Image (spheres, helix red, strand yellow):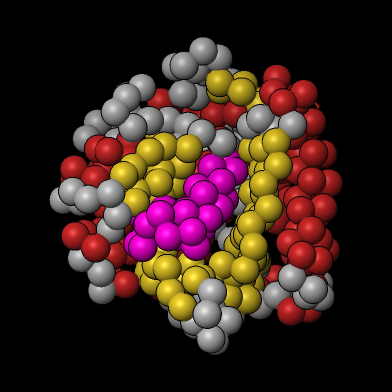
Amino acid sequence: MPLRSVIAGCGGCLPAQVVTNEELAARHGLDTSDAWIRERSGITRRHLAGPGETAASMGAEAARRALARAGIAPEEVDAVIVATATPDSAFPATAVHIQRLLGVTRGFGFDVSAACTGFIYALAIADAMLRTGQARCALVIGTEVYSRILDWKDRGTCVLFGDGAGAVVLRAEEREDGRGILSTHLHADGRHADILHVEGTTGPLRMAGREVFKHAVMKLAAVVDEALAANGLARDAVDWLVPHQANIRIIEAMGRKLGLPPERVVVTVDRHANTSAASVPLALAEAVEDGRIRQGDLVLLEAIGGGLTWGAALLRF
Ligand code: UT7
């Protein structure tokens, strides 16, 4: 029987500080409005990290919750793979800091850099390693502190992002019921590196929003079709779309493309804003926690971000 990577538990962690659009505009003296931000992006508020909240601390907390829900002890984890564009230090990797915070002492850990697509990349790597026997139980985490790399004078970017972390526990299992990751699909095209990037290693982030928007709609539509075709599945087989949370207009366009009613599309961008590599696992954790996504459901994950990088994962939860 083939090995499958099965999600045994999910968890999320958001910083305590919640900042509304009006508060953000007032705090930084921005020439913007709640109405503009809501209409163009769907965002109403975001969580921003306080002094003690780091990529590692939030990632570890999300992982703790995922492990608790899976009923798995830290001692069983033998791989920690972290997607982040905002590590606390150049090295050691955020994964190693999280290992220490959780008390994981076996196996290996490393970070993946693929901007907002990072979690899909990390999930694909973990899946390949689990299915080839290089690990048995992996923590896959997206954790970001974008508030540290934003230009708070640039209204075109600083209103769009938030901080947070999401995690899943993946376990290699021999299964007959079809549960597990069915396929992952990764892409990158460095020709578009300049339309969404961070200057140097400390920022700020720069984005040509309209350009990224056009690529997002086209590339996400294509990668979603690619994932379904690879599994011989029609669009109506999908139970849940868990998309990258950058803009409600992009999310709704993807839902319409799949013919999914809005209630089958998981949305957090209104409350979390864009948390980059954390957005997909945070949304997944929320929908699993509140009972929407159930065992056996077909779930489609997708994301696009700086690089450009983009990708999708199809899984039977
Ligand atoms: O996570 C990685 C993937 N990222 C994305 O997918 C983001 C993709 N892009 C977007 O979500 C949208 O392009 C934005 C939300 C960034 C912008 O929405 P838009 O409808 O594409 O607006 P725009 O950039 O075309 O700007 C329209 C106008 C401009 O003014 P002019 O040139 O028409 O006079 C901007 O200067 O809105 C202005 N503007 C603002 N006005 C008030 C830009 N930012 C703001 C702001 N408040 N915060």
Q: Quadrant of residue 65?
A: bottom left
Q: Residue 126, percent across and down?
A: 47, 53
- Whether residue 212 sits left or right of residue 95 in the image: it is right
Q: Residue furthest top?
A: 200
- Vertical comparison of 117 with 195: above or below: below
Looking at the image, which residue is at 58% across and 81% down? Answer: 178
- Quarter of the rendered image showing ligand 1: top right
Looking at the image, which residue is at 47% across and 54% down? Answer: 129
- Whether residue 171 sits left or right of residue 97 in the image: it is right
Q: Residue 9, percent across and down?
A: 37, 69
Q: Which residues are magenta?
A: 116-140
Q: Residue furthest bottom?
A: 177
Residue 168 lies in the magenta-colored region = no
Residue 117 lies in the magenta-colored region = yes
Looking at the image, which residue is at 43% across and 60% down? Answer: 133
Looking at the image, which residue is at 18% across and 43% down? Answer: 100
Question: Main SS of the magenta segment?
Answer: helix
Q: How many marks?
A: 0
Q: Residue 52, percent across and down?
A: 22, 35
Q: Quadrant of residue 156?
A: top right
Residue 34 seen in render: no
Q: Residue 317, percent across and down?
A: 53, 75
Residue 265 seen in render: yes
- Vertical comparison of 174 with 146: above or below: below
